[in-house]
Amino acid sequence: MTIAFVSPYPPSQVTLNEYGYHLIRSFAGKHDVEKIYVLTNHLEDNSAYSRYAMEGIELIPCWTFNSWFSVFSIRKQLKKLRPDIVIMNLQFMTFGEGKIAAALGLLTPWACRLLHIPAIIILHNIVETVKLDTIGMAESKWKGKLYLRIGKQLTRFILKADLVGVTISQYADILKTEYKRDNIILLPHGNFELPERKYLPEPLSEINLMAFGKFGTYKKVEVMLDATKILEKRYPGQKFKAVVAGTDNPNVKGYLDGVKKAYSSMTNLVFTGYIPEEKVADIFHDSTFVIFPYTTTTGSSGILHQAGSYARACILPKIDDLERVVEEEGYGGAYFDTDNAGSMADAVAYLMEHPEERKKIEDMNYAAAKGLPMNELAEWYLSHIHQLLSVSRK
């Protein structure tokens, strides 16, 4: 069979590129999978995709982030390729930071139905649980209500797909109740490739607090930097480093430049910029704790799974969705009150002063990361694909 994935893919900096990378590669070489097409977004230089070339996978840049016409570009490519199945790796801002571009791109599942191509959607967030004001989508209450209504309409278009998977049980319950559809399933997130474990050096000569991702909306690093200052005063003999690994969220360009200026006096602060896929392991291995400076969540966290893959303890905010994911998937960490630097410092300090607890969490997270490798998740998908194709061919 031939499979077309609609997904960002490294070195694209569009959200979910890394998840797409690991998921798509897990299908290569599988029995019955003849060819994989990745319909990804254009870069300034599309030849940069060649760094991630792999036998059996053809990368086809065919849509543009923030374009109003992505759905038509993808439809045109699908009509040309005529794959047996389409798998879409989506969240509500996959196709743009602008509301119109983002919304129009989410009509792609409907376009697949019009082409009579079976489609599976991996939906990483739902509008019912996202605080739209915190992710830059609504600046006022009335806009929030308007965008929620629009989001629900877009969800109905997304549910035109043959199968829609969400990675959090609460999301599946909400969608089934709200939209009365029977094509919604709880979909395992899957774990990234499990590298050889590297243990932290003991005793810890330096405490490296690392936050990873796209920052400025619901991920704001000031709380981590303020917590670092508190810890330095509390433990004057201990070396600390704060690492901001990533870039601005597209909705708040210039955010990190502002942070650099505001915290220019911190000599132990590092901004890495964009982390290419081949450098991700180094960033996690160099960290002592993976910090989650979130004010809300937008679905299951890929960074949580990465922290597990590299056997690092997490410092987590007390947010219902995130706590539920951590518990359901067997991960662990120390918790702090959301957006509270003193509370975050206390969480870090607890694991510093109780190294046996830190090591227990590292072991727990590494064990959780072994739970369902992407390679096995691909087999799970293929079983569903065979069911869909057998129905569609009748």
Image (spheres, grey):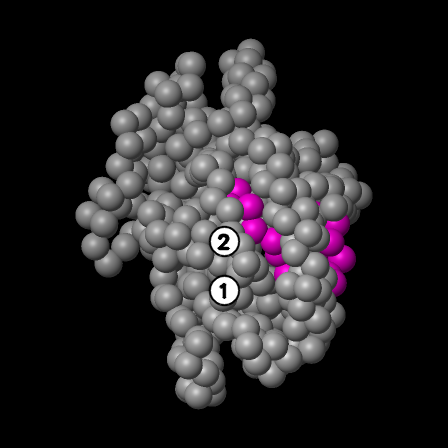
Residue 180 lies, in percent from the top left, at 76, 39
Q: Is residue 2 visible?
A: yes
Q: Which residue is mark 1?
A: 205
Secondary structure under tag 2 reads: loop
Residue 117 in view, yes or no: no
- Badges 1 and 2: C-beta atoms under 8 Å apart? yes
Three-letter code, disc 2? Pro
**195 sits to left or right of 340:** left
Q: How far from the left and from the top, in percent, is residue 150?
A: 62, 59
| Disc 2 residue crowd, few under 14, some 14–19, many 20+, Cα 10 Å | few
Q: Is residue 370 magenta?
A: no
Which residue does the numbered mark 2 point to in the structure image?
A: 201
Between 332 and 232, the one lying in front of the other is: 232
In this rendering, would 151 be left or right of 191?
right
Label 1 amino acid? Ser
Please tell me whether mark 1 sits on a helix, a strand or a loop.
Answer: loop
Which residue is found at the position 34% from the left and 23% from the top? 35
Q: Nearer the viewer, residue 384 or 334?
A: 334
Task: Give the side of residue 232 with respect to residue 72, left or right.
Answer: right
Which corner quadrant holds the C terminus? top right
Front residue of this view, candidates 198 and 51: 198
Task: Say which quarter of the image contains residue 369.
Answer: top right
